[in-house]
Amino acid sequence: MEPQASPPNSTERKRWMSILAKASYADLNSLWQNLPDKPEWSRIRAPEIGMVMVRGRMGGTGNRFNIGEMTVTRCTVGLTCGAIGHGYVSGRNKEHAEVAAVIDALMQRKERAETVEHSIIKPLELRHLDRRNQASKKAAATKVEFFTVAREN
């Protein structure tokens, strides 16, 4: 019998779950297909599609307000070694949620975490940062500076 999974650092787990949730399914699936020694798992909670309320803050820091609803898919799986993983993704892609849950469970296994980090999590994080930088550059190119010229009477 394999040793039990050790509880992950909550900050680290938030980081990798965020990366998995933000990744496109095409990117995630291509990296997942290349992962050697995929584990066996069973569904604890089959992928479910639902809605969540998205909230914002006025000015980014002010009072909270409801923006609207968003579709999400969630899934919970258990590896044969006992680790349990959860996947939450935006949209309606059940496979994305299930693969994210399996990867979450794998990341909790000390002997697999480093391999999964280097082969899946880090490349997804770099792709996300690249897309964000490209969007920022595109937005910066359209920036307009307004200024006022003082008039003398």
Image (cartoon, rainbow, N blue to C red):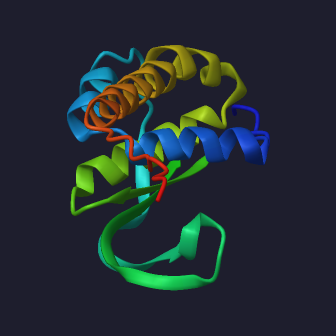
2 sits to left or right of 71: right
Residue in the picture at 66% in, 43% down? 13
Say which quarter of the image contains residue 88: bottom left
Q: Position of residue 70 (x, y in %)?
A: 32, 73
Give the left or right position of residue 95, taking residue 74 as reference.
left
Q: Quadrant of residue 110?
A: top right
Q: Residue at x 35, y 32 (%)?
A: 140
Residue 50 position in % (x across, y down): 32, 78
Front residue (pair 82, 55): 55
Question: In the visual, does 61 lie left or right of 138?
Answer: right
Up the image or down, 14 lies above or below 138; here it is below
Q: Residue 97: horizontal and vertical position, in percent?
A: 35, 53
Q: Position of residue 91 (x, y in %)?
A: 25, 61
Q: Which one is nearer the viewer's eye here, 120 or 11?
A: 11
On the rendered image, what quadrant is the N terminus found in? top right
What is the total number of numbered labels drawn onto the structure image?
A: 0
Q: Is residue 143 above or below residue 32?
A: below
User: Relative to residue 91, is residue 26 depicted above or below?
Assistant: above
The residue at the point 25 percent across, 40 percent down is 25
Is residue 140 or residue 12 the one in the foreground? 140
